[in-house]
Image (tube, helix red, strand yellow):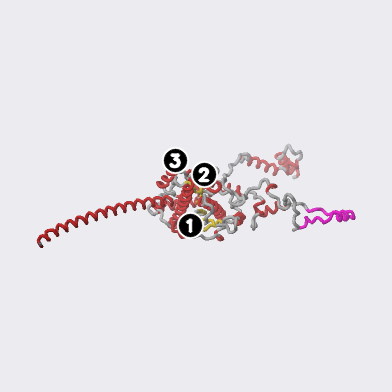
Amino acid sequence: MTISVQKMAIRVGRRSTSPSTGGFEADMFSLPIDNQQRANEISQEGCPQDIPQAKKLKTRSEIELDAWASWKYPSEFWDRLSKVELTRRALEELDRRTKTRRPPPTHTATTPGDLARFARYGDPNLCDLRGYPEPRRDRPTSPTLPTSATNKSSKSTTPYNRNFDQHLTDYQIYPSYSSQKPDLTHIRIALAAPRPSLSPSQFSDSTFEAFEEDNARAKDEADILANVILTILGTRNHSHLSARNTAFGNLEHLTDGTITLAKPDIYYGAYPAQLTQSSREKLSRHIVPSTTQDKPITPNFFVEVKGPDGSAAAAARQARYDGAIGSRAMHSLQNYSKDEPVYDNNAYTFSSTYHDGTLKLYAHHLTEPTTEGGRPEYHVTQTDTWGLTGNIDIFRHGTTAFRNARDLAKRHRYRFIEDANNKTRPDNDASFNAVADHADASQRSAGPGFEDPPASSTLSFSAIQTRAERLIKQSNSLLSSLANNHRGKNRSRFSILKQLNAAKDGPRAESLG
């Protein structure tokens, strides 16, 4: 029995003999380990680890969110907020300032010599006490609140931060719940005007179903802009100039410069050649948004869209910011060459947001400053909201209002441009007149929107007024000529009747005689 056990052990030992171990017992206990290593080698040979895996491409919304998340806000932005919301960014700023504070002084034992020196040099140093005012210096410093000069990587804040909302309010760019409400009676009437392109004969149920499917399939903001928003915009019309994803880097800052530049998804404006060069140069910082000079100027209609995972609150902040910029542009153009600015409390700028099938439309206007030398106040009013994916009737109502608002914004824009041109346009400027006539002809032929609009909306107010005066003069001259002819005919008719009467009376007188 002992011999058979030893033989069995020898067989197992031979099978498990490893060059790295010299003993029999080590070989026996290393048997499971060798099998596991051999299995690992087989698995590694079957599934090589060095083959690179394809990287997942990020969508546009993910890239934008990563970009916003990497932004760092300057200290001035936090210092100037009247109220700081408790957000992750605010806590990070508090931690940064806590780390940069001056370390507390170390206290040592006091000796009689220190007391004598303290009495000789006067008052104690109380700057380490909390709440003690800083002594006046020739150059202001703030050891506890370092400025952006110490933070080299600081950048502007964005609409994705809740403190962006408070920043706009601090600079009199109010949200809808605290804005003054303008008279929207005429605007609502204009928005409700029917559109031929959205009638049942031209916009079918199958087109609406395709819109619903595109909206359901959209994964991010890029899909919304490429496939969904086009149905709302309508057929492309080159007479209505627009641009996309343009940073407004040429404009004067609307606040203090600590927030990011406005960059609407879509904005509408006028051709630069429609406004005289002198007017463009004087108003450039208010009406020319981009450093690319051939992009649209005098923007007053904006579109902001978000993907299914986007933030509706961020879209509302962007629309509020865009509308304030457009209101300032219209106000500067309206008051061009005037000694005192006029505030008529009318809305000449519009913006819209689209998120998850919901379309919102806003009207923007500004009012005069409440204090002498203060800043104008900017207000936003929501005109209406539509769930476009609900049914085709609501889609028609919402899209009709959207396109009518776009046309209304264009009429206001062109009217202010023509008024400014009448103040500065030289009579003998043949080149400018040719460009203006060409723009006016293209406007009359193609209309102001992305589709064929009503004929009454194809001309600006000044052009309609000029044509009406011309028609009145022609009508007056025609009426005067008709009156002269009528008087002449009456005189000739009277003479003929007189002669006939004389001829009749002649024989009667002879018979009586």
Q: Which mark, residue 430?
A: 3
Residue bounds of the magenta highlight: 104-130
Quadrant for the C terminus in the image: bottom left
Give the amino acid at mark 3: Ala
Report the predominant secondary structure element of the magenta stretch.
loop
Structural crowding at the residue carrying mark 1, measured as other residues with C-alpha within 10 Å and reported as few (<14), some (14–19) or many (≥20): some
What secondary structure is found at the residue carrying circle 1? strand
Quadrant for the N terminus in the image: top right
Which label lies toward us, 1 or 3? 3
Q: Check residue 4 for magenta coloring.
A: no
Q: Which mark, residue 387?
A: 1
The residue pinned by badge 2 equals: 278
- Residue 81: image x %, image y %? 64, 56
Q: CA distance from mark 2 to mark 3?
A: 16 Å
What secondary structure is found at the residue carrying circle 2? helix
- Residue 277: image x %, image y %? 50, 43
> Hey, which quadrant is residue 392 in on the image?
bottom left
Using the image as rendered, state which of residue 135 and residue 314 is in the foreground.
135
Farthest front residue? Answer: 513
Please tell me which residue is depicted at 65% across the width and 54% down the height of the picture: 80
Structural crowding at the residue carrying mark 2, measured as other residues with C-alpha within 10 Å and reported as few (<14), some (14–19) or many (≥20): few
What secondary structure is found at the residue carrying circle 3? helix
Residue 147 appearing in the image: yes
